[in-house]
């Protein structure tokens, strides 16, 4: 990563998503222990503070997307996979049942210039995320093992990809979409008013299984 991101929202992020924050913290703690890492070791690998990670694992705060990306990379997974793990099991859910997310539900995560909302669940091989608002300047690059699909619902973005053909810039407006393979460094910014941008991304989770097979 190229720059130290903001850690998170305030610990008083609201009680409405407290169960989701607890599930996210539990998923991070479980994966950290599976990797044989202490909190201090994970903090060093992710270039984040030990107290912040402690609060995160206890569900007292939630990370920004850049911070979650750092944590995921340090744990050998993706931010979408960690967010998908933050799903409170429904008492009446049975194996093979549908996963329904209503408007306003899902784990909210701060994203530069706006917010992100996880729409998937661990049982599925894809991780859909809704982004509302984005920065009007480029931030750091991201990459992850799973292939990704981006669909522009509203507003306009410029997406910067480093594919096998070299660096490419694409401008996407409402109704436009783009796919790129896992491992592609990418970043996007708003063209015009960043608050008008709304995106849907879908990441293939199979890359994570392949990575650890």
Image (cartoon, grey):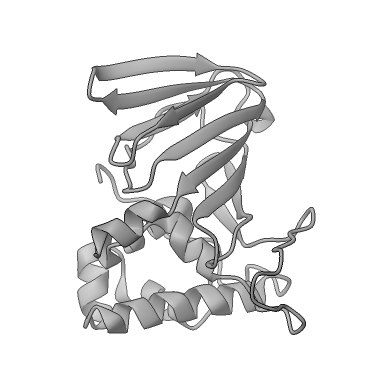
The image quadrant of residue 210 is bottom left
Between 142 and 146, the one lying in front of the other is 146
Relative to 68, is 212 on the left or the right? Answer: left
Q: Is 152 on the left or on the right of 47, as rendered?
A: right
Question: Left or right: 108 with respect to 82?
Answer: right
Q: Is residue 163 above or below residue 201?
A: above
- Residue 53 is situated, as x and y percent measured from the top left of the image, at 38, 74
Q: Residue at x 38, y 57 (%)?
A: 78
182 in relation to 22, above or below:
above
* In the image, farthest residue toward the front: 96
Quadrant including the C terminus: bottom left
Q: Is residue 132 left or right of residue 92?
A: left
- Residue 65 location (% of width, % of height): 46, 52
Q: Is any atom of residue 70 visible in this view?
A: no
> Can you give x and y, in whole percent of width and height, for residue 38 in the image?
24, 83
Tell me which residue sits at (79%, 57%) in the image: 102
Whether residue 99 is visible to the viewer of this picture, yes or no, is yes
Question: Is residue 165 depicted above or below 111 in this figure?
Answer: above
**Viewer-side residue, 204 vs 107:** 204
Q: Number of labelled discs? A: 0
Q: In the rendering, at what x and y percent does residue 212 appear?
A: 25, 64
Which residue is pictured at 25% across the width and 73% down the height?
Answer: 42
């Amino acid at each position: 990563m190229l720059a130290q991101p903001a850690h998170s929202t305030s610990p008083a992020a609201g009680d409405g998503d407290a169960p989701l924050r607890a599930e996210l913290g539990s998923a991070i703690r479980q994966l950290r222990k599976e990797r044989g890492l202490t909190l201090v070791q994970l903090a060093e690998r992710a270039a984040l503070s030990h107290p912040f990670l402690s609060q995160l694992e206890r569900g007292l705060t939630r990370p920004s997307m850049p911070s979650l990306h750092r944590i995921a990379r340090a744990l050998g997974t993706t931010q979408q996979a960690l967010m998908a793990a933050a799903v409170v099991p429904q008492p009446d859910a049975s194996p093979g049942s549908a996963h329904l997310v209503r408007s306003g539900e899902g784990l909210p995560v701060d994203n530069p210039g706006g917010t992100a909302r996880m729409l998937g669940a661990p049982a599925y091989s894809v991780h859909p995320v809704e982004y509302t608002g984005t920065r009007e300047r480029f931030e750091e690059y991201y990459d992850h093992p799973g292939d990704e699909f981006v669909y522009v619902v509203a507003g306009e973005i410029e997406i910067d990809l480093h594919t096998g053909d070299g660096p490419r810039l694409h401008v996407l407006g409402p109704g436009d979409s783009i796919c790129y393979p896992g491992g592609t460094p990418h970043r996007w910014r708003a063209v015009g008013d960043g608050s008008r941008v709304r995106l849907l991304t879908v990441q293939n989770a199979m890359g994570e299984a392949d990575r650890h097979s």
